[in-house]
Image (cartoon, coloured by chain):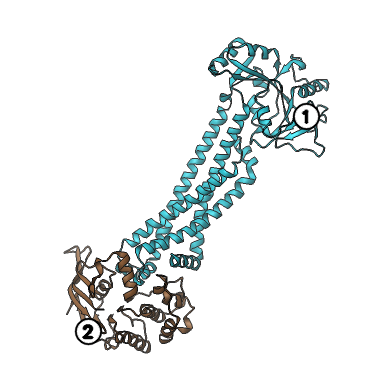
Amino acid sequence: MRFERSLSISNLRRKPVRTAALVLLTAFLSFAVFGGSLLVCGLRNGLSSYRSRLGADIVVIPNSARSKGTLDSILLQGIPGYFYMDSSVLDKVREIEGVEAAAPQFYLASASAGCCSVAVQIIGFDPDSDFSIQPWIRENYSGDISDGDIIVGSNITVPANRILSFYNTDCHIAAQLASTGSGLDNAVYANMNTIRQMMSNAKELGFDYFDSVPENKAISSVMIKVMDGYDIDSVTNDINIHIRRVEATRSQNMISGIANGLSKVSSVIGVLIAFIWILAVGILMIAANMIFNERVKEFAILRVVGISQKKLCSLVSQESLIISLAGAAAGIGAAALAVFPFGTAIRHSLDLPYLMPDAVTVTVIMCAAVLLAVVSGQMTSRISISKITSQETGILLRDGA
Amino acid sequence: MRVIAQGISKDYFRQRRDSNVFTALFPTDMTVSEGEIAAVMGRSGSGKSTLLNILAGLLSPTAGKVTYDDADIFAMSDDERSVFRNKHIGVIPQVHTGLHSLNVRQNIMLPYDMYGEKCPDERIDELLEKLGLMTLADVYPDELSGGEMRRLSIARALVRRPDVILADEPTGDLDGDNTRIAMELLAQAAGNGACVLFVTHDDEAAAYAHKVYRMSQGRIE
């Protein structure tokens, strides 16, 4: 084995152009597999994170929401928006059979005027009834969210004094959340009293977002948890039938558009990876064949001196292994440089939630990319060398002369 | 060690007007004993290289068998035959046979390195000296002339002091002086008990043989 290893290293060193070309080809394969898989995983992660943070079975919003910005554009794309309905909807929803819990949410778009530190989406919740926002805030922040406190998304710049002002309401930043890869990263969260204060101040400042709804009775949406044993679609239909001027939507349906988009992008990337893999393996196969045909005499000499077919295969395998590992390292390194720093750019360009996979997943993908490069290299070299070893050395000597 | 060929022949499948089979070697018997030098002479295409490759176990015969003492070389597995060739047979092929990734010294050491054995330095130096390659020991084959490459092949075939030496045109690229040196090395090996068989067109080289076979159209005359 030591002989095969040292000879394979010498062979690779003495033919630097040939070696570099093969390493480059393998790097291309690993780049596609690692980068593509990372991208698909990031998108799936983003959707999963988004789905878990929606946290409700049904979402009720006013009919008018369609003209003022839909819920998913507020939550997913981070486009500031608002819509309101009377808080009496909440009581009506709670009377519907099968509703286990119902919690109001409040959406307020901060202004880019001087009264607001930054133009963002503000999301308010009722600490007593909320079941969809507080659980995941608790993953990052275990303290109280008192009146005047806000929790900010990962994309919000936290000033040194930790104070942000919205409609002249000074708020203290109690915590900053981890990235979700969605528009939620651009949002600010406050309890009901804090956001009501902001809404009231907004009205005083002349921002009339509330139409005919009194600002102290305005809510934006109702998040509903359905009791076990009840069909979510039936409860959704009941709400739409019995409560006027609102639209109840199953939350799964809300993200079905994103899921479909993600599924399409994932499929395209999957097909692309498969195509590149087939292309790279094909090119590797042709290259290995051409190179081995050029090396027929070299292999024949080794056979004349007494190398066995097994040892010859082992020599070629070692060369292929070194090339595969070098190529995989280069390809994975290049893909990491291309994907890791540009997560935000990827999210914006695909218009889908994107969240970088954790270290364990990245390691698994990396190992898979290395394995694929090694297997592809071994496969092509074994096939090519078997064509050589299937011929008698006397014939190889004659043909290689 | 004695090499015995019994009824060995070789047919190739080749598209021809009258037949698809081309017989490169008709059934042939041959014995080369310890300490004996045998030369095979004949025109190009007469089957000399085919005969030599069969004797070396590099080409399987269509019929017949080759034994080294009592060991049938074609009854061995590939692993066994490869090790046997490495330990007992020194082959000098007709083609130039320097491995381009190894320098001259490493090329000569190859039969030892291949199976993890240590090559005695004095043996390499002796061959480098005798074959005039000492100053080229660290040079790679790309920089060698045809004659230098031929001498490298001879050194590599002799380095293990094999029991059998099979050489295809060993003096093909050599001038008079080097032909003499190469043939004296083969004669010295035979003097030490090796059996030597070589293919040649060169009368000067053939003069070193105890026995000369003449081949024509696949038959020994």
- Write the residue at 76% across / 33% down: A174
- Could you say which is closer to the camera, residue A84 or residue A52? A52
Would residue A90 appear left or right of A240 to someone viewing this image? right
SS category of the residue bearing label 2:
strand
Relative image position of residue A91 (x, y in whole percent): 67, 12
The cyan-coloured chain is labelled A
SS category of the residue bearing label 1:
strand
Rate crowding at label 1 as few (under 14), some (14 to 19) or many (20 or more) other CA atoms within 10 Å: many
Relative image position of residue A326 (x, y in whole percent): 52, 57
Q: Quadrant of residue A392?
A: bottom left
Relative image position of residue B169 (x, y in whole percent): 31, 80
Q: Amino acid at mark 2?
A: Val
The brown-coloured chain is labelled B
- Position of A29 relative to A92 (above/below): below
Using the rendered image of the protein, determine whether residue B196 is visible from the camera's viewpoint.
Answer: yes
Reading the image, the residue beneath label 1 is A149
Nearest to viewer (mark 2 / mark 1): 1
What is the C-alpha distance between the residues marked 2 and 1?
A: 107 Å
Residue B212, labelled with which disc? 2
